[in-house]
Amino acid sequence: MIKDIQSTVVKNIPVSVDTYLMGLNCPEISEIAIPGQFLMIKVADGLDPLLRRPYSISGIDQDGNILLLFKVIGKGSSLLKNKDRGEKLWLLGPLGRGFDLSERSKKHILIGGGIGIAPLLFLSQLLEKKEAEYRFFMGFKTKKDVIPIDFWKLNKAHIDISTDDGSMGFKGSCLQLLLSTFNKMDLEDASIYACGPPQMLNDLLNIPGLKSISVQISLESRMACGLGACRGCVIKGKDGYLRVCKEGPVFPSKMIARIE
């Protein structure tokens, strides 16, 4: 059930270049949210900005607080980064369709580019609880952009990091890193979950070796309402148009024609 409710900021700290981790106390949402869902957040008390902003739920901490990992890229996130502990924020959520773990996959491969790791970190927490076998490929521009994930306490994760300039981990994109390990990976009974820049996701969808594998894509989009009414976040699917906020933000790859 969707809630429109006030939360309390319990932490808001910088973790990387222009990247922050916020904790929100709101058990009414944290107790029902699933990985892949998002929130529409009212980032200011006044009318500027007028619209709420969409943010992926990045996890739930040991105290039951919602974790939000966000990058400062516009007015909304610039206001959000300045919120102090104890301040109140109105949340609408949890919204959208999350990741589907109903398929009996024995292996799980997570691929996140930059801030695209946010929803995948929440998924990692669930996989940890299920004691599932999973591998997490993370890609960043440089070592300075790498986002530390200590807050999520991922003890079972096999994590591979790449940077475009090679300043940390593999030199290249996280997709190039994935492809470099293909011959060593057993993809039978595997599922892939990905989130990141459009070009990264399109390149992923075009990898021939993945055509027979379950691939789920989490999309990021500008949104106005978050409920599907305004149709402001529509993308072109293979069988018509899809609303990222309603039919997504997580889509089976077979539903998507191309990501813009």
Image (cartoon, grey):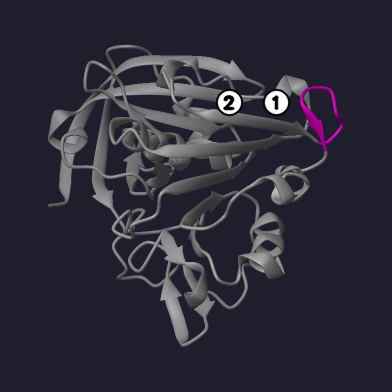
Q: Nearer the viewer, residue 109 or 151?
A: 109
In the image, what residue occupies the spot 65% across and 31% down? 160
Judge whether 11 appears above or below 4 on screen: above
User: What range is drawn magenta here?
Assistant: 164-171
In the image, what residue occupies the spot 74% across and 33% down? 162
- The kind of secondary structure the magenta stretch mainly shows is loop
Specify the label residue 145 is tagged with.
1
In the image, what residue occupies the spot 28% across and 53% down? 95
Specify the label residue 196 is tagged with.
none
In the image, what residue occupies the spot 71% across and 59% down? 199
* Amino acid type, residue under disc 2 in the picture: Thr
Q: Is residue 210 left or right of residue 255?
A: right
Q: Pointer 1 and pointer 2: residues touching (CB < 8 Å)?
A: yes
Q: CA distance from mark 1 to mark 2?
A: 8 Å
Q: Quadrant of residue 140?
A: top right
Residue denoted by label 2: 19
* Amino acid type, residue under disc 1 in the picture: Asp
Within 10 angstroms of label 1, few (less than 14), some, or many (20 or more) residues? some
Q: Nearer the viewer, residue 44 or 235?
A: 235
- Where residue 94 appears, x then y in whole percent? 25, 47
- Where residue 132 appears, x then y in whole percent? 37, 38
